[in-house]
């Protein structure tokens, strides 16, 4: 398990694979796309399991939204908006907020949102990204706004460190209705507070989403129960993969797609242009 600063993921994972170890790397997979591809090739050549900890696939709200879309409750989704907004106006003396490789929220928060979007909708046709350093003294990206374009859909991914008011976590509009959810999955905060598993109420999010459905002239709005989050499911899947009883829950090939979008997004921001995926 490699939960270290982003710029150390590649050398540590490479050393572990060369030593014959199976490897789980925290997101982002690496700092560059070329590094990600090199690790994937090394894992394949050594026959080792290489997985990336995109844990937000097991968030309570994302599991709820995924089920809604799979069941067709909202119809065809035309607009999907996802936010990771925080209020940290002071730049802290931490590697994530300094100017080194892999720092800033485009590497820290955006991989979560990109991975969730790709899980739901697949790769976009093109993307337009704005990256900025908005706080006084900022040395790394503390704001991003990304638009992923699909033939009949737009996906907006947004993150900032200067949002004092609460933003919706998800806003989703479809041909049959809409879903809006506030609040974050509670698992990370509970772990930070020292709680340990197992617990009967683990992963439960007490904040419901709001589902609005329209049929003809009738409009119905109701609170929609949030499914429990389940980070342990990732580790259970890793166990099964190592024992030959299941698939790698987040293979390197999927994390490489996220690195492709990370790099394309930086190019989009640099040139202030909409760029197509190759």
Image (cartoon, rainbow, N blue to C red):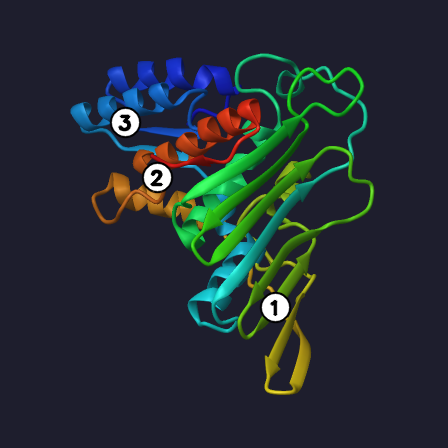
Residue 244 against residue 142 in the figure, above or below = below
Secondary element type, mark 1: strand
Q: Which mark is residue 269?
A: none
Residue 214 at x, y = what percent? 61, 80
What element does badge 3 sit on? helix
Left or right position of 133 against 125:
right
Judge whether residue 149 can be spotted in this image. yes
Residue name at image x 65 percent, y 19 percent: 140
Q: Nearer the viewer, residue 101 or 23?
A: 101
Q: CA distance from mark 2 to mark 1?
A: 28 Å
Q: Give the residue number, with chain letter if any, for mark 2.
A: 254
Q: Which mark is residue 40?
A: 3
Upstream in sequence: badge 2 or badge 1: 1
Q: Is residue 40 above or below residue 198?
A: above
Q: Which residue is mark 1?
A: 178
Identify the residue at horizontal 48%, vertical 47% (top origin): 149
Few, some or many C-alpha atoms within 10 Å of disc 3 (few <14, some 14-19, many ≥20)?
many
Q: CA distance from mark 3 to mark 1?
A: 39 Å
Work out which residue is located at the far bottom of the displayed protein and give it: 217
Q: Position of residue 70 (x, y in %)?
A: 42, 66
Residue at point 52%, 61% (across, down): 78
Query: Which quarter of the figure has residue 264?
Result: top left
| Mark with earlier residue (2, 3) | 3
Res. 143 image quadrant: top right
Image coordinates of residue 168 in percent, x first then y, are: 70, 53
- Viewer-nearest of labels 2 and 1? 1
> For numbered disc 2, what is the local secondary structure?
helix
Q: CA distance from mark 2 to mark 3?
A: 10 Å
Is residue 154 or residue 143 the one in the foreground? 154
Residue at 81% of width from left, 28% of height from top? 89
* Vertical order, 243 against 27 (above or below): below
């Amino acid at each position: 398990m490699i939960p270290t600063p982003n710029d150390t993921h590649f050398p540590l994972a490479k050393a572990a694979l060369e030593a014959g170890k199976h490897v789980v790397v925290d997101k982002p997979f690496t700092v560059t796309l070329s590094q990600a591809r090199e690790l994937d090739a090394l894992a394949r050549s050594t026959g080792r399991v290489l997985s990336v900890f995109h844990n937000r696939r097991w968030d309570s709200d994302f599991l709820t939204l995924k089920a809604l879309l799979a069941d067709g409750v909202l119809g065809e989704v035309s607009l999907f908006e996802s936010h990771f907004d925080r209020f940290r106006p002071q730049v802290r003396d931490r590697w994530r907020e300094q100017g080194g490789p892999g720092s800033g929220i485009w590497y820290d928060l955006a991989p979560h949102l990109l991975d969730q979007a790709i899980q739901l909708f697949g790769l976009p046709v093109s993307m337009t990204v704005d990256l900025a350093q908005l706080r006084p003294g900022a040395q790394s990206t503390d704001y991003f706004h990304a638009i992923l374009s699909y033939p009949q859909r737009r996906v907006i991914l947004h993150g900032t460190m200067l949002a004092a008011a609460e933003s919706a976590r998800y806003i989703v509009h479809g041909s049959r209705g809409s879903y809006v959810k506030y609040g974050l999955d509670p698992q990370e905060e509970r772990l930070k507070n020292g709680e340990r598993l197992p617990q009967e109420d683990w992963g439960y999010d007490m904040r419901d989403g709001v589902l609005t459905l329209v049929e003809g002239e009738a409009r119905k709005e109701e609170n929609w129960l949030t499914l429990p989050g389940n980070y342990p499911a990732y580790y259970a899947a890793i166990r099964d993969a190592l024992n030959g009883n299941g698939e790698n829950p987040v293979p390197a090939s999927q994390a490489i797609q996220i690195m492709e979008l990370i790099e394309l997004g930086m190019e989009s921001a640099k040139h202030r242009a909409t760029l197509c995926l190759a």
